[in-house]
Structures are given as C-alpha cells and as structure tokens.
Amino acid sequence: MSRHPRALAALALIVSATLGLAACTTGGLDHAAGAPATPPLAEVTPLADPLSWQGPSTAVAAASAIVPVTEGAQVLPVTVTDAQGSAVTVVDTSRILALDIYGSLSRIVFELGLGDSVVARDTSSAFPEAAGLPVVTENGHDLNAEAILDAAPTVILTDTSLGPWDTVLQMRDAGIPVVVVDSHRSLASIGTLVEQVGAALGVPERAAALAARSIAAVDAKIAQIADVAPADPARRLRMMFLYVRGQSGVYYLFGEESGADSLIEALGGIDVAGEIGWRGMRPLTDEALVDANPDLLIMMTKGLESVGGVDGLVEHLPAVAQTDAGRNRRIVDMSDTTVLSFGPASADVLDALAVAVYAPEVAG
C-alpha cells in the first residue's frame, strides 16, 4: 500500500473528474481508437542521441489480443479482505462488473478466462473483446447506479478511482458483493493487482500465472529499452510527467509513488520529480518547473489537447519555454486511459512510449 493514501485518493478524484470531462467532449472515445499503433520498438532505429531531437511525438499502444489463462479450477465461495479492510464473500461470478478509471480491472478479468461473465463495462474498457458491452459509467467516468442495477451483477470489482462513492455503497446496500482493490498503480503493483482480482473471483492459480506472465513481459521490455537508452548517465533524458487540464486550470506534476515515476525509470530516463523530492501529485509552479528543467515531458493526450497542443501549452505555461523540453518541443503524449493503466498490457504501453522517446520520427 502507498505511504500516501490521502494524496493518491485526491489524485484519483482529480484524474477521474478531468478524464470524465475529456470523455464527455469526445463521446467517450479513446484518442487512439482510430489511430495506427506506434511501430514496435524491435522494428525501429533509435536515435543515436535522443537529446538531439526536436519536436513532439505521440505514443499509441498496440491493441494486443486477450490470451486467457484457463489452467486452474475456480473455487467458490471465497471470502477475501479487500483493500479497505472489508471482508467480502463472493459466491457467484456468473455476472461480473469490473470498473476502474483505466479499464485495467476488466482486462484482467478477461485475461483470467472469465470474460464471458462480464456483463457491462466502464468507458475505458474499449478493447475489442469488451467493446460491445453496455456502458455503466456516464459523463465519462461517473458510476450510473441505475445502469449497474440493470446489469444485475453478482459481484462488482472496483477501486476508488470512480465515483460517486455513494453509488458503490448503494450497491452494497442492495446486497451485491463489492470488492475494492488497491487504487495505487505502478509497474511494481501489476502482480498484486492481478492477484487481488483473481482471489476475489476464486481463481488464484490463474492469477498467479497471469501475474507472472505480465511481470515477465514488462521485465523483458525494460531490458529491451535499456539496450536503446543511452548508457552514459549524462546523456539520459531527464523526464517529468505533467498532468494538465486547461479548461479546468489544473496543472500538476506527478511525482514519486504516482506510478509515473515507474514509467520514467522503465524508459531509461531520470525522474526529475524524484530528484526534487516530489511525492504523489502536487500543483505545478513556474519556479519549480524552471528549476527542474526537464529534457522531456510526458503528458496525457487529452491534457495536451486541452491547452491547444504544444504551442498552447507554452502559452498557458510560459515556464515550459524556459526548459530544455519546451525549447526543443520534446513532449510525448499518450492516451489518457492507457498511459497509467498498469495492467496485463503494460509491456505494450512501455513499447509505444519507448518508440515515441527514442525513435520519435516514426511515432505519431
């Protein structure tokens, strides 16, 4: 568990609200839905010196197919203690709802071989196997109590990234088992998240296998990225994850224990937020940005769009122009519902980001 639960809970609320606004203005469609995937890292030629590149790039993760883990019998009923310390007994998984802000939980359920039992989805669960299911979130990421009850779930898996929380309590009052998993996400927490879902659905053996498979894929991808990232620490890119919602006046730096730090480290970059000791998420100041002087900014696509792209970002945040990232327009963006999803497809996310960082001329 995070040592900063209040900060992470606040982060989840801010992300939920602003992602919801973005989804509302785009009909709930992911930015990358119609865009071609970024070419695989194995098929591109990386820059000899990533610090020599000038210009932005977009990372679009490949839509990898679900490969269910089916070995291991399901055993029900099962009683688990969830992330909030509640003891929850699950006796029936014939109608599953798995809801979170990034669609990671539903993806895990499908990967555990229980996709046929999923009866509805959140806005972010737009992968092909789930895309045809009815949506039970409205205005982007608000839980719709009526739609959830209409789906008649026998179990609900969720975290604290969606709201209103009263809707979750309403489901419990209606007698539906609700298992709340840990909302803290990072590359290091993928295995734990998978195991929490598997335990709640009575398939711990499958979860162990899926966790091992997902972690191995991430580890292999990190090793591959290390081969293309500069070996000389002085040539490594100093990166920051900047969270922006121009229409709401929201400008935040994601620091240590936000999950963004694990992405930067996996990409072979230097986490600037870690250098200055920023934890969780904190409002950005011009002085902090200029002093940090990142070489590259990672952003959510809708966040960048909300300020009018790179030119608008410099206009809204003049301090960006005083950084090496701004002077060289080195800004990498990725779909809001993908970049921090931290689930079984994380290796694909890392692959696309690595191409956008180290071979930006072939990225979007």
Image: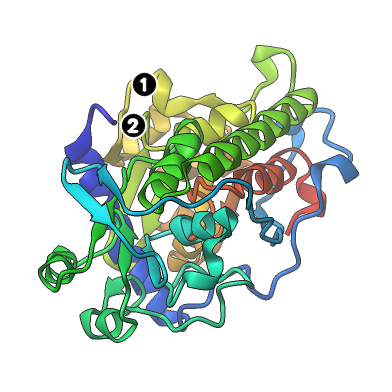
- Residue beneath the point at 46% across and 71% down: 118
Badge 1 local density, few (<14 within 10 Å), some, or many (20+)? Answer: few
Q: Earlier in the sequence, mark 2 or mark 1?
A: 1
Q: Is residue 27 above or below residue 306?
A: below
Cβ–Cβ below 8 Å for labels 2 and 1? Answer: yes
User: What's the residue type where badge 2 is placed?
Assistant: Ala
Label 1: element kind = loop
Q: Which residue is mark 2?
A: 288
Amino acid tagged 1? Ile
Q: For residue 266, which quarter of the picture?
A: top right
Where is residue 247 drawn, in percent x and y?
33, 69
Q: Residue at x 25, y 42 (%)?
A: 83
User: In the image, is 197 to the left or to the right of 226?
Assistant: left
Report, in whole angstroms, how far the alpha carbon at label 2 lies from the one at label 1. Answer: 9 Å
Figure quadrant of the N terminus: top left
Between 256 and 62, the one lying in front of the other is 62
Image point (66%, 60%), residue name: 66
Q: Position of residue 185 (x, y in %)?
A: 40, 41
Relative height, residue 266 to residue 37 (above, below): above
The correct choice, above or below, for 271 with respect to 154 in the image is above
Expressed as whole percent of the image width and height from the top left, the position of residue 159 reads 29, 53
Mark 1 sits on what residue?
A: 276
Quadrant for residue 165, please give it: bottom left
Left or right, 113 with respect to 320, comes to: right
The label nearer to you, 2 versus 1, is 1
Q: Is residue 4 left or right of residue 158?
A: left
Q: Which of these two is toward me, 110 or 275? A: 110
Please tell me in which quadrant of the rendered image residue 285 appears: top left
Q: Residues within 10 Å of mark 2 (few under 14, many from 20)?
A: some
